[in-house]
RNA sequence: GCGGGUGUAGCUCAGCUGGCUAGAGCAUUAGCCUUCCAAGCUAAGGGUCGCGGGUUCGAAUCCCGUCGCCCGCUCCA
């Protein structure tokens, strides 16, 4: 639990989870780098998602499509025409407004309307005697509507740095287009048939006007997307099933039900016919519920559009009924950065201990913990302890992401692992060696395993360690 | 883009009206110590004071410019 986005960002940097990008050049807004623990956490979240969405199902496959796609992709998908926000600035008070929101107040639905049409309507209104005003200062001195495209451009393959309409290549604004483009390949090569789905994890890029709130909104971000292709008659039931399946995944990984909800979209994106968000109650965003995953019914919009623009037949002939149809799509799309933020925010706990001190613990589900087990020699100045601890580390690190630490004293090392959410700490002591004062010989070749949450220890034989940790973390 | 805020070590800050080699705590690293929960002792590393220009014998400090970052408007996985 963090009480602000700043405190979680500072924590993430100090602990090695997430750093601002390009810090030595003074940071680069809206972009973040994942450090050692952040990278591992992210990989584990991704793995947990793949397990839920792909591994445990017979009707799902996984792909990894390229970030660059044929420019026509974005023309077909509607992103070039619709994926921008028409802006109108007030010349007097300098406020910026969304043109469609502004026009709504004059009874005009300008949602997803091309820019020329919007300016046409404004001119028409003026002719009929209605001059639109700045809702803030009331001034009528407004600019014409201007586009602010959310698509990021690249000069890939262009001989010059000129980004003309002909040679521009876009970085993908959503990963799912790579799925649609491979729809036919999957049908042809994997024996999948509707209803089935294709999943993908990868980066997407959006030229957000303002990227803020740490990794909650970034210009470069990772999506975990699933597109489920089914007969139009099945959309409703599939949509309901996926809603259920996805929210249960959050609960399975330790998010309390009362911190989750569904939020229904009233305004829909250009591709969607129904849209719900799964929201999480972020304490670092002042306890506000905000989106971590979107579920959309996209109809046959994408496959139809790509059929139309490419000429490919993106439909399915049901061999039983002889019916040929364009499958409809149910999409789930989760933001990996947001999920990382959510899990950190949710797991971070400050505990009051009996001795009056406090302890910071990252109570992540063990499966998500970056480091599964840490190995310590009880004392740093006893070479036999160090040597034995290194032996134990070698055994564990062959199986798990592990850490070795002989710095400072044992308490400090426990706290350090608590802070990054390591479920188990293994300590090699004199009992392990079977020698020293007052040593119980029955403890030879056993170590203490200390649990992150209970702080309790138990003695485990070294040969049983791997099995022990595996049982808790798989 | 506009408005507001801000910029000295990894972090939190001190450095007042210009003046010793820019400091402290925490953190980091090394050594000593330590037989299980952030103890102690010793030492070390780390800063072109955001950047550029000006005023001055002298600028972290004053002036001008510029840039980055943060917050709001907008957007969204």
Image (spheres, helix red, strand yellow):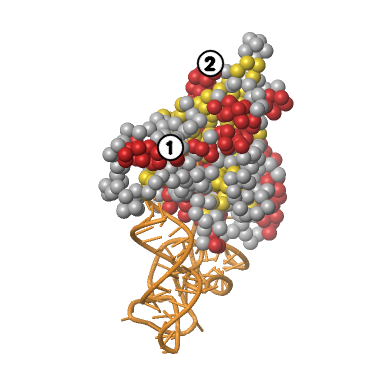
Judge whether residue A173 can be spotted in this image: yes
Q: Is residue A329 above or below residue A81?
A: above
What numbered label is drawn on residue A233? 2
Q: Label 1: which residue?
A: A117
Measure how far apart labels 1 and 2 are at the Cα level.
36 Å
Percent x, y for residue A267? 41, 32
**Please, what secondary structure does the residue beneath circle 2 have?**
helix
Crowd rating for badge 1 (residues with CA inside 10 Å; few <14, some 14–19, many 20+): few
Ranked by sequence position, the earlier of labels 1 and 2 is 1
Which residue shows up at 44% across the image and 35% down it?
A113
What numbered label is drawn on residue A319? none
Front residue of A301/A231: it is A301
Front residue of A121/A413: it is A121
Which residue shows up at 52% across the image and 58% down it?
A27
Percent x, y for residue A296? 50, 29
Q: Does residue A354 appear to the left or right of A161 in the view shown? A: left
Pick the quarter of the image with the C terminus of chain A.
top right
Pick the quarter of the image with the N terminus of chain A.
top left
Q: Is residue A251 above or below residue A438?
A: above
Which residue shows up at 36% across the image and 40% down it?
A123
Percent x, y for residue A112? 45, 35
Q: How many numbered marks, from 0 up?
A: 2
């Amino acid at each position: 639990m963090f009480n602000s986005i700043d405190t979680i960002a500072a924590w993430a940097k100090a602990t090695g989870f997430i750093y601002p990008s390009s810090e030595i050049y003074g940071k680069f807004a809206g972009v973040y780098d994942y450090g050692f623990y952040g990278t591992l956490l992210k990989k584990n979240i991704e793995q947990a998602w793949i397990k839920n969405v792909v591994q445990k199902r017979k009707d799902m496959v996984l792909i990894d499509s390229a970030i660059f796609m044929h420019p026509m992709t974005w023309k077909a998908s509607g992103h070039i025409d619709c994926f921008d926000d028409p802006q109108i600035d007030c010349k007097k008070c300098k406020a910026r407004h969304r043109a469609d929101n502004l026009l709504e107040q004059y009874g005009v639905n300008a949602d997803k309307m091309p820019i020329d049409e919007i300016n046409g309507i404004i001119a028409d209104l003026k002719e009929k005697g209605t001059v639109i005003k700045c809702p803030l200062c009331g001034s009528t001195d407004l600019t014409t509507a201007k586009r602010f495209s959310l698509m990021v451009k690249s000069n890939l393959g262009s001989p010059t740095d000129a980004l003309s309409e002909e040679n521009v290549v876009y970085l993908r604004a959503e990963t799912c287009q790579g799925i649609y483009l491979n729809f036919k390949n999957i049908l042809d090569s994997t024996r999948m048939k509707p209803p089935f789905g294709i999943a993908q994890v990868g980066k997407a890029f959006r030229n957000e006007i303002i990227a803020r709130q740490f990794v909650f909104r970034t210009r470069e971000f990772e999506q975990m997307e699933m597109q489920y292709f089914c007969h139009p008659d099945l959309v409703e039931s599939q949509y309901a099933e996926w809603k259920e399946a996805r929210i249960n995944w959050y609960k399975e990984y330790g998010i309390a039900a009362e911190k989750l909800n569904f939020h229904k979209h009233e305004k829909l994106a250009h591709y969607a016919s129904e849209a719900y968000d799964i929201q999480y109650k972020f304490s670092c965003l002042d306890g506000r519920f905000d989106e971590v995953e979107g579920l959309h019914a996209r109809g046959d919009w994408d496959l139809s559009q790509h059929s139309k623009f490419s000429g490919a037949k993106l439909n399915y002939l049901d061999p039983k009924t002889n019916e040929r149809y364009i499958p409809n799509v149910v999409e789930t799309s989760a933001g990996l950065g947001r999920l990382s933020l959510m899990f950190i925010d949710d797991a971070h706990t400050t505990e009051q201990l009996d001795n009056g001190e406090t302890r910071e613990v990252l109570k992540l589900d063990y499966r998500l913990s970056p480091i599964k087990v840490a190995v310590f020699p009880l004392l740093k100045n006893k070479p036999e302890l160090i040597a034995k601890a290194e032996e134990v580390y070698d055994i564990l690190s062959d199986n798990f992401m592990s850490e070795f630490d002989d710095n400072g004293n044992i308490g400090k090392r426990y706290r350090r692992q608590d802070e990054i959410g390591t479920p188990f700490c293994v300590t090699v002591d004199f009992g392990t060696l079977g020698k020293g004062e007052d040593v119980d010989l029955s403890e030879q070749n056993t170590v203490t395993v200390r649990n992150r949450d209970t702080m309790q220890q138990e003695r485990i034989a070294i040969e049983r360690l791997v099995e022990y940790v595996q049982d808790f973390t798989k």
